[in-house]
Image (cartoon, grey):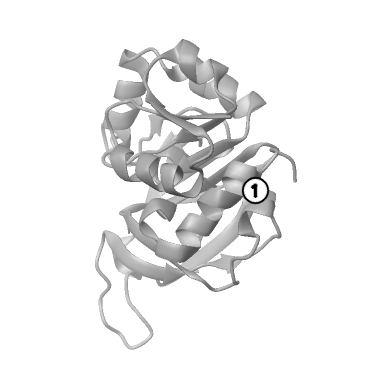
């Protein structure tokens, strides 16, 4: 089996590729920006890290928009961090003026919003930092094959200043608190996407990646 990791010049590509090689030594892991090669892969991973507007520009400049959208429709597809955020309609990040939004890929209805400064207070009254960085528990709000053998409340690793806000609550399969509840994993048909970084999340993250490798793309 061939698993393509989409290379659009943004994200922790080496870590994602190495983690997949670790959990799937029997398969071919291909880091590629070639649309034809990506289209021929059996499964696709869409990672990302950095500014969403820059990521969107790189996807378009490298001619990858069409193959991302096509494989998101047709193959087991895993989005990670900005690769998950890019699947929504809009983002506050990179907008040209306050109150405006920049367009993303529109696979899922909803937007990506910045953590609001006026709500970044914990239960003890201490101010929380943005970006949200480090380990946080994940509540599995719906069953899914990629949660197999991962305990509810397991901790995963995050680095982000913006969060996914789905317009369809049924898409959400995982939540964390910072300090309010927000969506950290979404799924629909053949797509599973996470705000956290499974490739940096030790045993639980590797288990999720292994579950993706064995997943047939159905729920």
Q: In the figure, is residue 183 to the left or right of 127? A: right
**In the rendering, at what x and y percent does residue 176 appear?**
49, 66
Residue shown at 33% from the left, 88% from the top: 124
Q: Quadrant of residue 190?
A: top right
**In the rendering, at what x and y percent does residue 66 appear?**
50, 15
Q: Which sits in the foreground, 24 or 168?
A: 24
**In the rendering, at what x and y percent does residue 76 appear?**
62, 34
Q: Looking at the image, can residue 146 be seen?
A: yes
Residue shown at 62% from the left, 53% from the top: 146
Residue shown at 30% from the left, 85% from the top: 125
Q: Residue furthest front?
A: 26
- Say which residue label 1 marks: 171
Q: Residue furthest right?
A: 219
Q: Which sits in the foreground, 68 or 163?
A: 68
| Label total for image | 1
Please determine whether, in this image, residue 160 is positioned above or below residue 32.
Answer: below
**In the rendering, at what x and y percent does residue 118 appear?**
31, 67
Q: Residue furthest bottom?
A: 124
Q: Secondary structure at mark 1?
A: helix
Residue shown at 36% from the left, 69% from the top: 135
Q: Looking at the image, can residue 181 be seen?
A: no
């Amino acid at each position: 089996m061939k698993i393509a990791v989409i290379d659009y010049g943004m994200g922790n590509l080496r870590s994602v590729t190495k983690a997949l090689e670790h959990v799937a030594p029997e398969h071919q892991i291909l880091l590629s920006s070639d649309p034809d090669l990506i289209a021929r892969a059996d499964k696709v991973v869409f990672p990302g890290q950095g500014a969403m507007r820059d990521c969107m520009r790189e996807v378009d400049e490298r001619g990858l928009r069409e193959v991302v959208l096509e494989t998101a429709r047709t193959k087991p597809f895993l989005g990670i961090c900005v690769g998950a955020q890019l699947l929504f309609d809009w983002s506050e990040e990179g907008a040209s003026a306050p109150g405006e939004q920049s367009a993303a890929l529109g696979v899922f209805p909803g937007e990506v919003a910045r953590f609001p400064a006026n709500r970044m207070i914990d239960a003890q009254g201490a101010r929380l930092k943005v970006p949200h960085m480090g380990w946080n528990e994940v509540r599995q709000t719906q069953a899914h094959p990629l949660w197999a053998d991962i305990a509810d409340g397991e901790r995963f690793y995050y680095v982000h200043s913006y969060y996914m806000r789905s317009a369809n609550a049924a898409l959400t399969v995982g939540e964390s608190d910072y300090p309010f509840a927000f969506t950290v994993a979404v799924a629909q048909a053949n797509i599973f996407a996470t705000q956290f970084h499974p490739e940096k999340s030790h045993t639980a993250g590797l288990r999720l990646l292994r579950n993706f490798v064995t997943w047939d793309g159905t729920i």
